[in-house]
Amino acid sequence: MIFNNLIRIAKPYCYALYSLFFVSGFATATDSEFPNHITIATQHWPPYQQEVNGIQTGFSIHALRCVMAKMKQRYKVVFVPWGRAQNGVKTGQYDAFFAASQNEWRDEFAVLSNTFIEQKWKFYLHKDSTLSTDIDSLKASAVFGTRIHSNTDHWLHKNEFQKIRQFGSIEQLVKLLSNKRIDAIMENALLFEEEVLKAGYTMSDFKVIENMDYNLGVYFSKRLLKKYPQFLSTFNKNTNACIYAHD
């Protein structure tokens, strides 16, 4: 009799406790679908991204900001050398790096989002160059300058261009090409044009050969995506509304 009374008294509290655990568990599962905060590494790479006096601007900065705002995702962008940005994601120091195009080495430790930031790759020669502009001829004969750790450098090596010299910056490459110290550059068109104007040259100083479109996205670490498997699909769903295309 006493036992039955105790059960009757305790039953409402058991239901309440069960409900509390259920609601709490549901909330935790929902909250854990996305990270509270992520750190994204990038390089100084105008006009795509730059930081001046603590202000971050550029085409890819604005495109990323658009996607993250739609997701309501908190994040921080840090500017570091490009090699460190990529290796930092590989080692777990950062959650992602951008703006980046696909290559096999990056695919080993990270996953590329939808590409939503336009990039065009072109070949550039000095206007006085006597080299054939046929790609196979350039592959065999031209001395190319590239940016170390860049995907353009990776692409030239992958496609068996024979004479490649690595340098630290686009500034060096434009100066070397202008002074005929190298024969050619294969580079992001916006990046090259920006540096040409900055250095006081004009595009008429160079021969331009179209190569390919190779658009940019964000590489997210596999560690992050394993922990938050819904993150990338949600990010990708929001990229269409935030596409950057150069007019």
Image (spheres, rainbow, N blue to C red):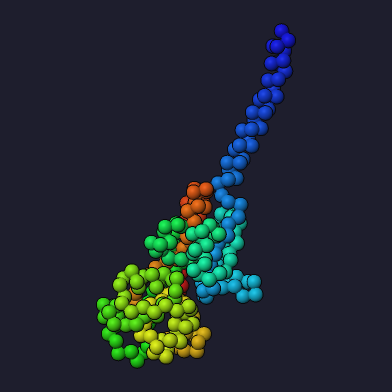
User: Is the C terminus in the top left, top right, bottom left or bottom right quadrant?
Assistant: bottom left
Side (left or right) of 126 relative to 74: left
User: Is the N terminus in the top left, top right, bottom left or bottom right quadrant?
Assistant: top right
- Using the image, determine if residue 78 lies above or below residue 202: above
- Using the image, determine if residue 27 lies above or below residue 205: above
* 46 or 109: nearer the viewer: 109
Residue 241 spot, x, y in % from top left: 50, 60
Query: Residue drawn at (66%, 25%), measured in percent from left and top?
Result: 15
Q: Is residue 63 visible?
A: no
Residue 147 spot, x, y in % from top left: 44, 76
* 143 or 238: nearer the viewer: 143
- Using the image, determine if residue 60 lies above or below residue 186: above
Q: Is residue 199 visible?
A: yes
Query: Residue drawn at (58%, 64%), measured in percent from left and top?
Result: 77
Query: Residue drawn at (72%, 18%), measured in percent from left and top?
Result: 9
Residue 136 spot, x, y in % from top left: 26, 77
**Residue 79 picture quarter:** bottom right
Residue 170 spot, x, y in % from top left: 47, 79
Side (left or right) of 151 relative to 98: left
* 224 or 9: nearer the viewer: 224
- Using the image, determine if residue 91 lies above or below residue 136: above
**Residue 28 picture quarter:** top right
Side (left or right) of 224 relative to 36: left
Query: Residue drawn at (60%, 70%), measured in percent from left and top?
Result: 56
